[in-house]
């Protein structure tokens, strides 16, 4: 979502006459987009700001002004802290306020002393005021939903991105068509809770994600559809049916479970238990037998004991995720879990994360190895590290390298997979 927001901010700035600089020292304006999900992400901002303060000083010595801004969830949560810890920051705004950037910039240019801060949640939707999105290549993100009402006890999202809102069906379809006209082949629908999408159609009727997927399926020129991130309890039968019906829907789903222990899921305030999660997985596999799953895990949530952790390891063995993201529980100020008594020691969290990741990486490697010898569709998105190479994504989001002419950039090719590591595949193009 942050990549999407940054892209939209870049479009606003382009419309104001800005051009992208090749490095910070050439930039008159620098904006950091920030994440507050775990403590590490937040601290990274302050270390990056320290470095950029030096650039600002070097430029000042050459007689050049540099305006520095911070956007995103850290601002929403720690607005005053930013001004205190980094007073050279000229302006800061939250993730729902960025459509007001032109006004914010004007105020910042005139500021005397205080950092200009905008973290208001207004009733209006930013999407109604943003300039039209632009395709940046063959793969585009499209935000259809934002915010979250789930209030998992560890998570800051409902506080920083606000309550759940869905964009109207018409707006989503118009944006999708425009992106496809500009060269997009793959659309990844975004939302913190994307499968609880409930946007209104032109008759004012609420429509679900399945409805949107079926409409997108009809857009000529659109080849691939993905959606992320889904909440397990909100995967309904209509959505599952889409995985059978819609060939453009890629056979890969990110479906976070967080923990394999019902006790911990309850303490996390998740609206699903392990059995329900596994049931959804089974139904999706029935709809599309070649589907692969990825997930998010948190280890060391308050109260997690060895038995709970063993249950998480069991779930991994049951589902055999083809990719996963796993984290040590990180206390977030203002969330209920941060003040729970039975916090887990850092040392234990570290050990569990290592054990879990070894297992997850092992399944990921095995899955990648099982791709060797197969011929897959790959959408080439970028130049590779070596000359004459391109990199792209398989339907399963695996990163694949191949020797390829750069004319094949932003195209889908048939590629025979030759080698696999945990993080990537390499292959040979067999059909352009
Ligand atoms: N500590 C650790 N991981 C977290 N996540 C969200 N909040 C926290 C936290 N406080 C993880 C969850 C979520 C992913 C985006 O980040 O696994 O799915
Ligand atoms: Fe956070 Fe996701 Fe839970 Fe919402 S569903 S509170 S975004 S972890």
Image (cartoon, rainbow, N blue to C red):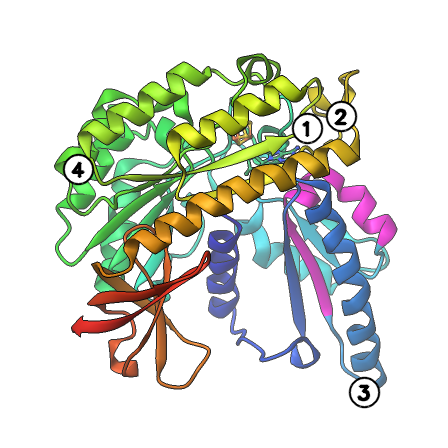
- Taking depth in this image into account, of 253 and 289 the one nearest to the observer is 289
Question: Label 3 to label 2, Cα distance in Å?
Answer: 51 Å
Which label belongs to residue 214? Answer: 4
Task: Point out residue 92 in the picture as x, y percentages from the top left corner.
Answer: 70, 51
- Helix, strand or loop status at disc 2: loop
Per the image, the residue denoted by label 3 is 62
Label 3: few (<14), some or many (≥20) within 10 Å? Answer: few
Horizontal side of 81 relative to 28 (left or right) equals right
Q: Are marks 2 and 1 in contact (CB under 8 Å)?
A: yes
Can residue 239 be seen in this snapshot? Answer: no
311 above or below 49? above
3 and 4 marks in contact (CB < 8 Å): no
Q: Quadrant of ligand 1?
A: top right
Q: Which quadrant of the figure has residue 231? A: top left
Which contiguous range is marked in magenta?
67-85
Q: Whole-percent x and y of residue 109?
A: 72, 65
Chief secondary structure of the magenta span?
Answer: helix
Does 423 sit left or right of 327 as displayed?
A: left
Q: Which mark is residue 117?
A: none
Residue 83: image location, x then y, percent: 82, 50
């Amino acid at each position: 979502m942050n990549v999407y927001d940054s892209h939209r901010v870049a479009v606003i700035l382009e419309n104001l006459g800005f051009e992208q600089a090749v490095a910070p020292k050439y930039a008159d304006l620098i904006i950091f987009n920030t994440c507050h999900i775990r403590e590490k992400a937040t601290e990274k901002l302050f270390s990056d700001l320290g470095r950029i303060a030096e650039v600002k000083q070097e430029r000042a010595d050459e007689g050049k002004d540099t305006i520095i801004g911070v956007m995103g969830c850290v601002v929403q949560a720690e607005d005053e802290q930013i001004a205190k810890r980094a007073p050279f920051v000229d302006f800061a705004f939250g993730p729902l306020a960025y459509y007001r950037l032109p006004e914010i910039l004007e105020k910042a240019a005139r500021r005397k002393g205080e950092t200009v801060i905008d973290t208001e949640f207004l009733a209006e939707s930013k999407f109604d005021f943003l300039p039209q999105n632009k395709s940046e290549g063959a793969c585009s993100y499209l935000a259809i939903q934002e915010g979250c009402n789930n209030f998992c006890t560890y998570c800051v999202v409902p506080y920083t991105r606000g309550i759940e809102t869905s964009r109207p069906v018409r707006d989503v379809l118009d944006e999708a068509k425009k992106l496809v006209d500009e060269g997009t082949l793959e659309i990844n629908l975004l939302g913190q809770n994307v499968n609880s999408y409930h946007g209104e159609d032109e008759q004012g009727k609420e429509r679900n994600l399945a409805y949107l997927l079926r409409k997108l399926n009809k857009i000529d020129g659109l080849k691939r559809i993905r959606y992320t991130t889904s909440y397990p309890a909100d995967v309904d039968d209509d959505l599952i049916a889409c995985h059978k019906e819609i060939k453009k829907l890629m056979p890969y789903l990110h479906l976070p479970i967080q923990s394999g222990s019902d006790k911990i899921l309850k303490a996390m305030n998740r609206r699903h238990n392990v059995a329900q999660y596994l049931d959804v997985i089974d139904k999706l596999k029935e709809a599309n037998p070649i589907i692969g799953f990825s997930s998010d895990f948190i280890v060391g949530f308050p109260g997690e004991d060895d038995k709970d952790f063993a249950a998480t390891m069991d779930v991994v063995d049951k589902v055999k995720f083809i990719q996963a993201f796993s984290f040590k529980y990180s206390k977030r100020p203002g969330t209920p879990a941060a003040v729970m008594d039975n916090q887990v020691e850092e040392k234990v969290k570290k050990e569990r994360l290592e054990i879990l990741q070894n297992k997850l990486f092992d399944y990921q490697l095995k899955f990648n190895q099982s791709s060797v010898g197969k011929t897959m569709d790959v959408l080439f998105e970028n130049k590779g590290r070596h000359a004459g190479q391109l990199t792209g994504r398989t339907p399963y989001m695996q990163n694949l390298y191949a020797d390829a002419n750069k004319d094949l950039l932003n195209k889908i090719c048939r590629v025979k997979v030759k080698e696999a590591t945990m993080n990537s595949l390499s292959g040979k193009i067999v059909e352009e």
